[in-house]
Image (cartoon, rainbow, N blue to C red):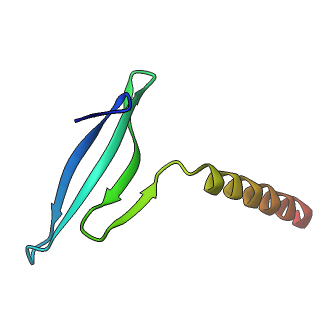
Amino acid sequence: MLFWGGEKVDVWLGDSDTRLIHLMVYTRRENGQWKIYRVRDLTHQFEHPIYDAGAIARARAWSAKIAQEYENKQ
């Protein structure tokens, strides 16, 4: 299924108790490779972007702080 220059892929996951989880996986092609950028859990009505600009910025800030603290301990 085409979606904004990428594709949506219907995914069903199951376990040994036959419980199923229905996911919608959003992909796009970057530099000749397909990449997942978003996953929606349709069973539990939950969505989490793979690439979250805010989360990436917070992780970079945390990493810079930790690196500075590490350097100060050396």
| Residue 27 percent coordinates (x, y) | 35, 38
Q: Is residue 31 above or below residue 43?
A: above
Q: Residue furthest bottom?
A: 17
Q: Quadrant of the N terminus?
A: top left
Q: Quadrant of the C terminus?
A: bottom right
| Residue 22 percent coordinates (x, y) | 21, 61
**At 14% across and 71% down in the image, what residue appears?**
15
| Residue 25 percent coordinates (x, y) | 30, 48
Instruction: Give the image quarter of residue 62.
Output: bottom right
**At 44% across and 59% down in the image, what residue appears?**
48
Q: Quick one: 38 or 18, which is closer to the camera?
A: 38
Q: Relative to 51, is 55 on the left or the right?
A: right
Q: Relative to 28, is 23 on the left or the right?
A: left
Q: Is residue 53 above or below residue 23?
A: above
| Residue 39 percent coordinates (x, y) | 36, 53
Q: Residue furthest right?
A: 72
**At 62% across and 57% down in the image, what residue appears?**
55
Q: Residue furthest top?
A: 32
**At 78% across and 63% down in the image, what residue appears?**
66
Q: Quick one: 38 or 2, which is closer to the camera?
A: 2
